[in-house]
Amino acid sequence: MHGILLLITWIQFSKLIHQSKQKCCTITKILLYLPIINVTLIFEFCKVKEMLFRLILLFTLVPLIELSLLIEIGRQIGLFSTIAIVIITGIIGAYLAKYEGFRVIYRIRQDMSQGRIPAEGLLDGVIILAGGLLLLTPGLITDVIGFLALIPLSRHYIKQYLKRKFKQKIDSREIYTYYTIDDE
């Protein structure tokens, strides 16, 4: 009997999970009153479904927008000019990623040789890696974001944003740690 009730409740919950996060939390609160459902499982299910929805949007909408933009630019300036832009941004991006990557590796080595933890350098390295990966994908929006990740001035702002997000997650106990992030 409990198995059938659990299955029906799970199906109803799965149907409603596609709604907004606020409604997901409301559904979760309602389901908390049912003694047969594990509370932790419900919260994790909400997080997974929300993340899955974001990833689906990311991997479907971004390529569609990029493709639409490339087609429109191709209409305006021509096919070969558009292809040249994509190739040139790829070459410049690869060079910039290599250059900035070596700079960060050098900084990490310096920090480690002086007995310091290279936290800043590692975060820079992750941002540079993400920027390089964005530059590998054909499209202009991802290229702009990739270049912003590779340029030291804009990378500084990205790094500050990521630090704030990490600090928020640590403070809200979404991330458990024994360390703190110092604000600069």
Image (tube, helix red, strand yellow):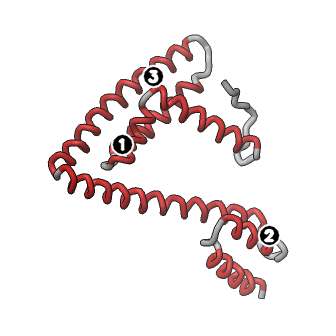
Q: Quadrant of the C terminus?
A: top right
Callouts 1 and 2 close, C-beta under 8 Å = no
- The residue lying at 60 percent from left, 72 percent from top is 18
Alpha carbon distance from label 2 to label 3? 48 Å
Q: Nearer the viewer, residue 37 or 33?
A: 33
Outermost residue, front side: 76
| Relative to 156, 95 lies left or right | left
Mark 2 or mark 3, which is nearer to you?
A: 2
Residue at the location (16% across, 52% down)?
Answer: 79
Task: Please identify, in this view, whether the residue under mark 1 or under mark 2 is nearer the observer.
Answer: 1
- Figure label count: 3
Residue 29, numbered label: 2
Three-letter amino acid code of the residue under disc 2: Lys
Residue indicated by mark 3: 105
Quadrant in which the N terminus is drawn: bottom right
Q: For the residue marked with disc 1, what is the amino acid?
A: Asp
> Marks 1 and 2, Cα distance to the nearest angstrom?
42 Å
Residue 12, above or below 94: below
